[in-house]
Amino acid sequence: MYNKIIKKTIDILISLIVLSLLMIIFMPIIILLRFTGEGEIFYFQKRVGYKNQYFYIWKFATMLKNSPNMGTGSLTLRNDPRVTPIGRFLRKTKINELPQIFNVLKGDMSLVGPRPQMEVDFKAFPGDIQEVIYNVKPGITGIGSIVFRDEEKIISESTLPPREVYEKVIAPYKGALELWYQKHISLYTDIMIIFLTAWVVLFPKSELHFKVFKDLPARPLEIWSPGHSFTKSPGL
């Protein structure tokens, strides 16, 4: 009931309110992007979405136009040279994701759900997860986005090659987190995920999500660099 009717209604109402408020922020960003970097404002990228159907996601442009065919491809590293100066700020604050409000209004996405992936990254999920992860609409934010809020750092500091650490460590755990979300989807869960998204932007090292959602899948130790401080999650 919640997922089919109430969630969709809330998505539309909140998106309309947020969009009207964000116009004050959007205008200076649009001007800055137009006259910096390569002059691109929005970036449209093909992603896997609801029921594994493709759609084009909206983002503010933060990287060079040909970045998917350069360096590490779909994976972004810390201090990635393909990211523009203003793009670094937009990515760090997650402002680059805000244009996805238009995707929510179009019905491609929800405010909360699994992040839509490029096909190459979608195929990194184990087969059983690929079959069901998008039985709900992808979201602007989600539990996977919160836990992997600094995915670039994890990939950059791993001793494994970038693609290997994503396929062997990040993708399986990210998939497990999103399956947890499907089992616990509710108004409460969505509200807390939205709150926690804002919280980890302000406090990037916070582990509050593991305290709020005490039954999250146990995380693999391989994704945490030496010296990273964390509280053990259930099952560890």
Image (spheres, grey):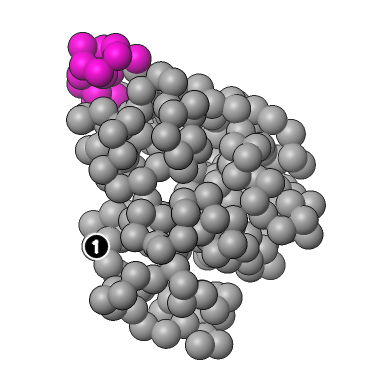
For the point 49% across and 35% down, the residue is: 73
Residue 114, placed above or below residue 97: below
Q: Quadrant of residue 93?
A: top left
Q: Quadrant of residue 65?
A: top left
Asked if residue 126 lies in the magenta stretch, the reply is no
Q: Quadrant of residue 52?
A: top right
234 and 221: which one is in front? 221
Residue type beneath disc 1: Phe
Q: Main secondary structure of the magenta part?
A: helix
For the point 40% across and 42% down, the residue is: 76
Q: Is residue 29 in view from this perspective?
A: yes
178 and 191: which one is in front? 178
Within 10 Å of disc 1 (Cα), the crowding (few <14, some 14-19, many 20+) is: few
For the point 34% across and 60% down, the residue is: 157
In the displayed structure, does residue 69 sit left or right of residue 199? right
In the displayed structure, does residue 47 sit left or right of residue 44? right
Q: Is residue 21 in view from this perspective?
A: no
Residue 30, placed above or below residue 160: above
Q: Read off the magenta span.
A: 24-40
Horizontal and vertical percent for residue 16?
45, 31
Horizontal and vertical percent for residue 128?
78, 59
- What residue is shown with label 1? 203
In the displayed structure, does residue 174 sit left or right of residue 62? right
In the displayed structure, does residue 160 sit left or right of residue 130? left
Horizontal and vertical percent for residue 196?
38, 61
For the point 47% across and 54% down, the residue is: 161
Q: Secondary structure at mark 1?
A: loop
The quadrant of the rendering that contains the N terminus is bottom right
179 and 84: which one is in front? 84
17 and 74: which one is in front? 74
Q: How many marks?
A: 1
Horizontal and vertical percent for residue 179?
67, 63
